[in-house]
């Protein structure tokens, strides 16, 4: 039975350019959305850019342009990169959009009217990079754990949100809903935060030092704290499309582990104060590192998505990202590891099956599909292997184990390649009397390719399209996941020419360290903000 799902990426802060970490998040969300769409679910994917705050104002000043000019340029670059790498979002959110500004001001006005916003003194250890206060316990050797810089002590009058008022309610909800935050380790981390005093949240900045933000609706001398502004995008984006009531209850946020506190503590308390139900799931992934170090422009180890795409192809990058990282854990990127995956899995596994099958179809039958009969035990075993792959894929992807889902498909592909070796159609074809059996064997191989392409479509969409074209299947037949094995190809159906899906890579790493995907002056490594 078809359902509904709302999937969100973080909003990416536009003092930055997309890199491998943000690309991973968007590839995961895009794949998850395609998976649900393929199964008939009403699916909505939101991504976008977070455009207010001190860092934006500083970056714009350094570039010699207004904040509006700066964010327009960098946001357009983000959108162009996501379009270039095939992210199929349904709405691209900008926190400078007029509908979002109006929504934030409406929420602030309602919370203020309810008595949950008050004026007070703001002081503490402040990281400009994160644009938030840190406690001494949260620092690592006195430094911000994300930027490795020493926070500055700040003190000024500001508006506060009574966040602590809702602490017990949020903690109770997480304790009562074991899958609210996934994987389990991040749920435990969030609960540990909520067992300590969380205090109230400063949600304003005086215009005397920051004008680039959403003006507080009840005091024109202040703008809204960037996190309070940005988090509300998840609801305002649906409001803009008239989909809040039906899709918000099935909201699935995908974030990196560095913004767990804002999403597991700040955001739920804000929702409760505003009178909205909590989201369905918070899905948290780890970091991509390079040479064992978190990617950073200052270290010179940032990997850019367009440079990789231009060198290796986007589906190869998608496969590597989804297969190499166990969702929730950290993973290390090297070009050699990428090349190994391309050669071992994509070229030798899927690519080899496609090229051998299609080539033999044309060599022995001029591309015309032959009947499946006579059927042998090994034929039944092959179809069963792909049925298991389908079931395992569904189980693993719904549990966010994308790497295991792909492993399940590759087990079936391995069975198909072994099937060709065991049945030896290239040997049988030497005897004209065995040609009916050869035709049946190759028909089973074509079914292996069809089912593989269907299962891979959410994760390797371009490859699935190329396979569908090579198999000469119309979109309706190809999209039917319930089409029984052996019923996709009528006798004498014409197969397209052999394709080389993933040529082997014999050279060493070739991707440039930097690419053309640069948003403009003042850009820094991409930082997800909400």
Image: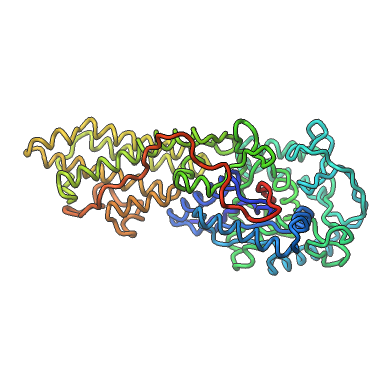
Q: Nearer the viewer, residue 4 or 335?
A: 335
Q: Is residue 389 placed above or below 238 in the rendered structure?
A: above
- The number of discs equals 0
Q: Is residue 384 left or right of residue 261?
A: left
Residue at image coords 92%, 49%: 155
Closer to the camera in the image, 417 or 275? 417
Residue 224, picture quadrant:
bottom right
- Residue 412 image point, x, y percent: 35, 37
The image shows residue 279 at horizontal and vertical percentages of: 64, 52
* 293 and 400: which is toward the camera: 293
Residue shown at 42%/51% (left/top)? 461
Q: What residue do we see at 46% from left, 34% from top?
A: 508
- Among the 4 quarters of the image, the one containing residue 107: bottom right
- 109 vs 496: above or below: below
Quadrant containing the N terminus is: bottom left
Q: Residue furthest left?
A: 433
Looking at the image, residue 492 sits to the left or right of residue 109; the answer is left
Q: According to the image, what is the colour scheme of the structure?
A: rainbow
- Residue 159, image x, y percentages: 87, 57
Q: In this view of the protein, can residue 514 be seen by the observer?
A: yes
Position of residue 37 measured from the top left corner of the image (x, y, whole percent) = 46, 56
Residue at 89% x, 57% y: name it.
Answer: 118
Horizontal side of residue 436 vs 457, given as left or right:
left
Q: Is residue 530 visible?
A: no
């Amino acid at each position: 039975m078809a359902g509904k799902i709302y999937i969100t990426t973080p909003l990416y802060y536009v003092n930055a350019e997309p890199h491998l970490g943000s690309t991973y998040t968007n590839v995961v969300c895009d794949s998850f959305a395609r998976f649900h769409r393929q199964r008939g679910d009403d699916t909505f994917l939101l991504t976008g850019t977070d455009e207010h705050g001190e860092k934006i104002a500083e970056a714009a000043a350094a570039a010699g342009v207004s904040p509006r000019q700066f964010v327009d340029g960098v946001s357009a670059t983000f959108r162009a990169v996501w379009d270039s790498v095939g992210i199929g979002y349904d709405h691209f959110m900008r926190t400078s959009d007029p509908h979002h500004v109006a929504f934030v001001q409406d929420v602030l006005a309602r919370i203020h009217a309810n008595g949950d916003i008050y004026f007070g003194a703001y002081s503490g250890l402040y990281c400009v990079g994160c644009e938030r206060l840190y406690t001494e316990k949260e620092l690592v050797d006195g430094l911000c754990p994300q930027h490795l810089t020493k926070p500055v002590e700040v003190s000024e009058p500001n508006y506060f949100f009574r966040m602590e008022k809702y602490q017990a309610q949020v903690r109770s909800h997480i304790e009562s809903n074991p899958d609210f935050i996934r994987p389990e380790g991040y749920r435990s981390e969030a609960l540990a935060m909520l067992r300590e005093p969380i205090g109230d949240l400063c949600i304003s900045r005086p215009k005397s030092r920051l004008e680039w933000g959403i003006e507080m609706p009840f005091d024109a001398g202040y703008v809204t704290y960037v996190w309070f502004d940005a988090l509300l995008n998840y609801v305002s984006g649906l409001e803009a499309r008239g989909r809040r009531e039906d899709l918000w209850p099935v909201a699935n946020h995908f974030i990196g582990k560095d913004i767990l506190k804002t999403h597991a503590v700040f955001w739920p308390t804000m929702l409760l104060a505003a009178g909205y139900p909590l989201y369905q799931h918070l899905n948290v992934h780890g970091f991509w590192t390079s040479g064992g170090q978190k990617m950073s422009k200052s270290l010179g180890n940032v990997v850019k998505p367009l440079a990789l795409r231009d060198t290796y192809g986007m589906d190869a990058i998608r496969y590597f990202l989804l297969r190499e990282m166990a969702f929730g854990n950290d993973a290390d990127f090297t070009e050699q590891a990428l090349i190994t995956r391309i050669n071992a899995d994509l070229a030798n596994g899927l690519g080899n099956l496609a090229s051998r099958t299609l080539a033999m179809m044309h060599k022995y039958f001029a591309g015309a599909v032959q009947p499946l009969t006579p059927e042998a035990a090994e034929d039944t075993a092959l179809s069963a292997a792909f049925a298991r792959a389908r079931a395992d894929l569904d189980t693993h992807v719904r549990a966010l184990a994308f790497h295991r889902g792909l492993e399940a498909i590759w087990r079936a592909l391995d069975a198909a390649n072994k099937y060709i070796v065991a049945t030896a159609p290239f040997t049988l074809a030497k005897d004209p009397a065995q040609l009916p059996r050869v035709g049946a064997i190759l028909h089973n191989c074509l079914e292996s390719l069809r089912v593989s392409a269907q299962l891979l479509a959410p994760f390797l969409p371009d490859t699935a399209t190329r396979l569908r074209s090579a198999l000469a299947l119309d979109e309706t037949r190809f999209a039917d996941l319930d089409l029984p094995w052996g019923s996709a190809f009528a006798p004498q159906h014409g197969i397209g020419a052999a394709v080389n899906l993933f040529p082997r890579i014999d050279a060493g790493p070739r991707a440039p360290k930097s690419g053309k995907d640069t948003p403009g002056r003042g850009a820094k490594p991409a930082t997800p903000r909400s």
